[in-house]
Image (cartoon, coloured by chain):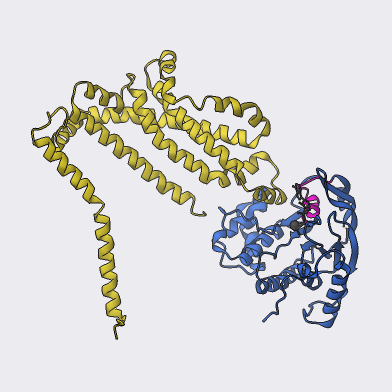
């Protein structure tokens, strides 16, 4: 008789074992990080590479403390967040507005869609010379560059989301007495297109950090500019500090948004 | 009273419905029976005002139908519940559009949810409901709007046989409780039609024309297994013999337990 009897006590042990196992497998995700840090530290302290090429992890920690103490880190973070929030607010709201209008009104679609789409293949960074010339080196210039990618992403996603709204839901609303365009959009079209719109926003949040660095490199103060300046001075430890800061903040934005998204889309 | 006069509908070159005329008195339960593709959905959608006729007119209480309105409730085969709204919020939709105060909306919606037997499910989302429950909510949502007539397009076709029989009986109960609103009920299923209807409109193969209008003068509640029902069913099947295969119109038969 090789059949193990599943007594309550054994069940308990199985459960504990399997919970230990899941914890272990989660912890396994840390291994690459630890290994990476270890190799980095070994290479850096081996003396094979000059410190300005591969600063040690410890040097990065020191650089972090110095940037923090001088107030530069928080100042640059604050400025960058200003560019980021402003740029995304513009890009996302105009993107959703255009996506909605073009997908909802056939005449707007016919007249504007080809025009709006014609500019899409131009990479946002290509606008920088114009923006700097027209707006100068200031917050709005960085925000504008950031807004371009967000605009197209939100525009495309909203457009597709609205076009994809199940017709029967609109007909149901019609037969329940909702016949105004504003009411239909508010009560049916927007909620139905919300999953697609939120995807657009989430992708924009990621693209925002990429265009942020590109926009600031042209002389607008913020995380990106500080990073490039430090690179010019061969202060690689400082560059790494800013890489990590941007990475962490961008990850945090993504997590926060995913959390909000899950809450808004519980009905899915 | 609903009057349909010389109604036709063409989709480009295809004629879906041809010169159909009939009228429905208030409080009638009318079933519309006909082979697939004969224009039943097209007919209901025209009455609802969702599409415009190619010729002819539809007159409800002396007024020509031009656009959709809450006086003609529509129950869709695919339920068409708003998935982001709870049961309660779905039923409140029409009341919200009308601008009723939240307290009154809530009270009315609760009453109709109770009417279809779903008290306790107010905060459920559509995805958490079975097909039968979804269709009950769709019916409650329409009735909460207090329409003049209710248009139902094969509302129980997606349900299994057992559930369908239960739903038919409950629909009749609700209909009674609601002072018998006029109902136009499209179906493929002869059994369903003879069980529910005061009168059955039999349509021909596409383009839909009126084959015959059959009054069903049987007392309610009806017994599905009664010889009268059986005889009527046979008559309709004979009538349709030239139109379609019998199996299509019989649907699956099942005995309630
Ligand atoms: N929007 C449309 N455009 C073109 N043709 C259509 C459209 N809607 C329906 N038709 C055609 O009109 C005819 C009638 O369609 P309808 O949906 O009214 O039939 P039905 O009687 O409801 O069929 P079923 O019993 O299968 O639901 C069909 O041949 C269909 O292909
Ligand atoms: Mg149909």
Residue extent of the magenta highlight: B41-53
Camera-side residue of A142 and A123: A123
| Residue at the spot 44% in from the left edge and 14% down from the top edge | A134
User: Does the magenta-highlighted stretch encompass residue B48?
Assistant: yes
Q: Position of residue B77 (x, y in %)?
A: 69, 59
**Residue placed farthest to the bottom in the image?**
A1
* Image quarter of residue A210: top left
Left or right relative to B223: residue B79: left
**Is residue A181 positioned above or below B132 on the image?**
above
Left or right placement of residue B28 versus residue A8 in this view: right
Q: Nearer the viewer, residue A249 or B6?
A: B6
Residue B104 appears in the picture as rendered? no
Q: Residue at x 77, y 64 (%)?
A: B187
Q: Which hue is chain B drawn in? A: blue
Which residue is nearer to you in this view: A122 or A263?
A122
- Quarter location, residue A242: top left
Image hue for chain A:
yellow
The percent position of residue A214, horizontal first and vertical second, equals 35, 25
Instruction: State which quadrant residue B92 falls in.
Output: bottom right
The picture places residue A223, in percent across and down from the top left corner, at: 29, 28
Does A219 appear in magenta? no
Q: Quadrant of the N terminus of chain A?
A: bottom left
């Amino acid at each position: 008789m090789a059949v193990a009897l599943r007594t309550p006590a054994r069940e308990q042990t199985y459960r504990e074992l399997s919970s230990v196992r899941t914890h272990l497998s989660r912890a396994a995700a840390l291994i690459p990080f630890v290994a990476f840090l270890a190799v980095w530290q070994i290479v850096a302290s081996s003396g094979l590479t000059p410190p300005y090429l591969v600063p040690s992890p410890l040097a990065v920690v020191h650089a972090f403390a110095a940037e923090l103490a001088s107030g530069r880190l928080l100042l640059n973070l604050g400025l960058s967040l200003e560019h980021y929030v402003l740029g995304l607010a513009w890009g996302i709201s105009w993107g959703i507005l255009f996506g909605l209008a073009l997908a909802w009104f056939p005449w707007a679609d016919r007249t504007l869609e080809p025009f709006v789409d014609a500019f899409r293949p131009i990479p946002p960074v290509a606008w920088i010379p114009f923006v700097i010339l027209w707006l100068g080196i200031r917050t709005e210039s960085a925000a504008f560059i950031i807004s371009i990618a967000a605009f197209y992403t939100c525009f495309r996603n909203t457009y597709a989301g609205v076009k994809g709204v199940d017709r029967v839901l609109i007909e149901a609303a019609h037969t329940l007495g909702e016949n105004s365009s504003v009411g239909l959009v508010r009560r049916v079209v927007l909620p139905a297109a919300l999953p697609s719109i939120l995807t657009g926003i989430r992708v924009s949040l990621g693209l925002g950090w990429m265009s942020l660095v590109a926009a600031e490199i042209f002389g607008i103060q913020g995380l990106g500019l500080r990073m490039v300046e430090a690179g010019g001075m061969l202060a690689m430890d400082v560059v790494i500090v800013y890489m990590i800061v941007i990475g962490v903040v961008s990850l945090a934005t993504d997590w926060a948004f995913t959390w909000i998204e899950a809450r808004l889309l519980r009905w899915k | 009273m609903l009057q349909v006069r010389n109604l036709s509908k063409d989709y480009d070159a295809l004629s879906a419905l041809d010169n159909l005329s009939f009228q429905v008195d208030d409080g009638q339960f009318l079933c519309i029976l006909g082979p697939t593709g004969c224009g039943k959905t097209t007919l209901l959608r025209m009455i609802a005002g969702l599409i415009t006729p190619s010729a002819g007119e539809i007159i409800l209480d002396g007024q020509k139908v031009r656009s959709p309105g809450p006086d003609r409730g529509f129950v869709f085969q695919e339920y068409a519940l708003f998935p982001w709204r709870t049961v309660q919020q779905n039923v409140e939709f029409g009341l919200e559009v009308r601008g009723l105060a939240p307290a009154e909306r809530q009270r009315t919606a609760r009453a109709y949810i109770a009417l279809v037997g779903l008290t306790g499910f107010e905060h459920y989302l559509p995805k958490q409901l079975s097909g039968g429950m979804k269709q009950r909510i769709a019916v409650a949502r329409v009735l909460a709007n207090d329409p003049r007539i209710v248009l139902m397009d094969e509302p129980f076709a997606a349900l299994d046989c057992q559930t369908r029989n239960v739903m038919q009986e409950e629909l009749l109960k609700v209909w009674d409780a609601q002072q018998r609103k006029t109902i136009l009920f499209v179906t493929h299923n002869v059994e369903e039609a003879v069980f529910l209807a005061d009168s059955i409109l039999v349509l021909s193969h596409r383009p839909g024309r009126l084959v015959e209008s059959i009054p069903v003068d049987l007392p309610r509640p009806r017994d599905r297994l009664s010889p009268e029902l059986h005889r009527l069913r046979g008559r309709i099947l004979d009538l349709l013999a030239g139109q379609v295969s019998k199996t299509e119109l019989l649907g699956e038969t099942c005995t309630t337990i």
